[in-house]
Image (cartoon, rainbow, N blue to C red):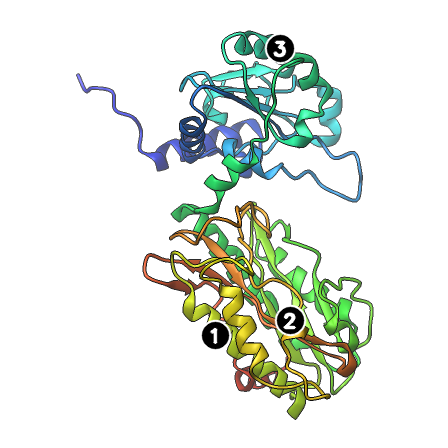
């Protein structure tokens, strides 16, 4: 008789997908064993404490679709609304609470998994799946043995949690979750690469269609349509397409101006695919050719970016005043190359930080005090913004920190100004 052996991870994942298809659920709800491993990591950090996180609710605003709270997704992989997760010190004590099914509402929102569904445990990856109606009693029983409850500040104000955990300390769980989320697994890196590849395709599509006289929103629509057509669920952030004077506005997102010849256009647009974001910026000439002054400013920004990327390695820091600061490398380059119209150094026109982490959020959970480590994914994005000249230039790439240095995940999209001009000449 053959002994029972745990199914390989790919087999378990395939089984969950087949179950989801059978029950009519979306493929995106399939849960990987990696999520249980993440809960184990969190358990090891907190030891004798309970963690409670609330998933996002069903959207009641027709402007927005449902999107899971990132920390909740990170620990559970669960993509349906109204759920609650409790992570306990006991490895087999974790509980996923899901709302009881309401068939009348499912006519509008689609079939949901109920706590009584026969395959609820196998689909969710949790040994215990209970109805949210039992959350109060279950949590009170747990807190009789574990007096500290970690949660998110927004969840601490939930009437349900306030009732169940009245009188208990509820410290912030974010520092622990941020520490875990900063270092990406190979699967996470692959998903960020997918979002990055789709974003690259979006930028190339914009380059093929852009002409003086077009509107910024036409460029944005082309870019969003490109990565959504590749299966990405949404934009990682509101697309930024800023031409002329708008190029000098850091987070301009109105995208309503007509672009004219002789102007640069800042395109800061990235996709979100399977919950993971990308973040790419390129600055291109609307008319196909940089003016001498635009190229001069562009070359300074590009030089600063190259200097910073070359310095990326474990042990470096993102903070402006931190030891081994990548920001300082970029700032010093900008401040010692080129002048404004008044002969002043350009450092004062670099008015934002150089970098942030990328993951489930485009500005992903992080601890600024932590030095870089292998597996972290960051941006490198110097910029110069001179309103007086209607010139803004930002160049942004997604960079993976490796054991010995870095790898630019968005390297397939040109940054060299000559390459950009050649690409712009290849119109549809």
Percent coordinates x, y for residue 368 in the rendering: 53, 50
Residue 39 place in picture, x, y as percent = 45, 29
Position of the N terminus, as image quadrant, is top left
Judge whether 415 appears above or below 294 on screen: above
Q: Residue at x 40, y 20 (%)?
A: 91
Residue that carries the numbered disc 3 in the rendered image: 134
Q: Which residue is mark 1?
A: 306
Marks 3 and 2 sit apart, C-alpha to C-alpha, by 53 Å
Question: How packed is label 1: few (under 14 Cα within 10 Å), some, or many (20 or more)?
Answer: some
Furthest residue in direction bottom, as rendered: 292
Q: Secondary structure at mark 2?
A: loop
Q: Splitting the image into 4 quarters, where does residue 340 fall?
A: bottom right
Look at mark 2 in the image and give the residue it sits on. Answer: 350
Is disc 3 in contact with disc 2, using a CB cutoff of under 8 Å?
no
Nearer-N-terminus badge (3/2): 3
Callout 3 crowding tier (Cα within 10 Å): few <14, some 14–19, many ≥20: few
Depth check, front residue: 192 or 224: 192
Tell me where residue 393 appears, x and y as whole percent: 65, 76
**Cβ atoms under marks 2 and 1 closer than 8 Å:** no
Disc with the residue nearer the chain's start (3 vs 1): 3
Q: Quadrant of residue 132?
A: top right
CA distance for labels 3 and 1: 55 Å
């Amino acid at each position: 008789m053959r002994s029972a052996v745990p199914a390989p991870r790919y087999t378990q994942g395939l089984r969950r997908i087949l179950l989801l298809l059978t029950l009519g659920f979306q493929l995106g709800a399939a849960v990987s064993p990696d999520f249980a491993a993440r809960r184990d990591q969190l358990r090891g950090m907190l030891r004798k404490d309970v963690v409670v996180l609330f998933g996002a609710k069903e959207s009641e605003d027709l402007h927005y679709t449902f999107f899971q709270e990132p920390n909740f997704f990170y620990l559970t992989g669960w993509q349906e609304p109204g759920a609650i997760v409790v992570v306990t010190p006991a490895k087999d004590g974790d509980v996923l609470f899901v709302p009881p099914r309401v068939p009348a509402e499912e006519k509008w929102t689609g079939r949901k998994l109920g706590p009584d569904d026969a395959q609820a445990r196998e689909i969710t990856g949790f040994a215990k799946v209970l109805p949210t109606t039992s959350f109060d009693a279950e949590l009170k029983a747990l807190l009789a043995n574990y007096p500290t409850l970690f949660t998110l500040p927004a969840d601490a104000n939930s009437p349900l949690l306030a009732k169940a955990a009245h009188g208990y300390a509820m410290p912030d769980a974010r520092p622990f979750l941020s520490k875990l989320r900063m270092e990406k697994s190979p699967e996470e890196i692959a998903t960020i690469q997918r979002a990055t590849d789709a974003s690259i395709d979006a930028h190339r599509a914009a380059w093929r269609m852009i002409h003086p006289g077009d509107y910024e929103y036409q460029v944005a629509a082309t870019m969003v349509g490109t990565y959504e057509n590749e299966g990405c669920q949404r934009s990682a952030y509101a697309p930024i397409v800023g031409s002329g004077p708008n190029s000098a506005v850091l987070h301009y997102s109105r995208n309503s101006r007509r672009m004219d010849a002789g102007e640069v256009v800042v395109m800061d647009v990235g996709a979100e695919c399977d919950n993971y974001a990308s973040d790419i910026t390129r600055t291109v000439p609307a008319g196909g050719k940089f003016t001498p002054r635009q190229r001069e400013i562009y070359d300074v920004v590009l030089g600063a970016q190259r200097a910073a990327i070359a310095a990326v390695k474990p042990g470096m820091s993102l903070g402006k005043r931190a030891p081994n600061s990548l920001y300082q490398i970029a700032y010093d380059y900008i401040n010692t190359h080129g002048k404004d119209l008044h002969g002043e150094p350009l450092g004062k026109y670099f008015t934002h930080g150089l970098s942030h982490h990328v993951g489930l959020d485009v500005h992903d959970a992080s601890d600024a005090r932590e030095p870089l480590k292998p597996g972290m994914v960051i941006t490198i994005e110097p910029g110069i913004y001179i309103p007086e000249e209607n010139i803004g230039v930002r160049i942004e790439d997604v960079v993976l920190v490796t054991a010995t240095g870095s790898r630019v995940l968005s390297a397939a999209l040109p940054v060299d100004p000559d390459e950009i001009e050649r690409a712009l000449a290849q119109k549809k």
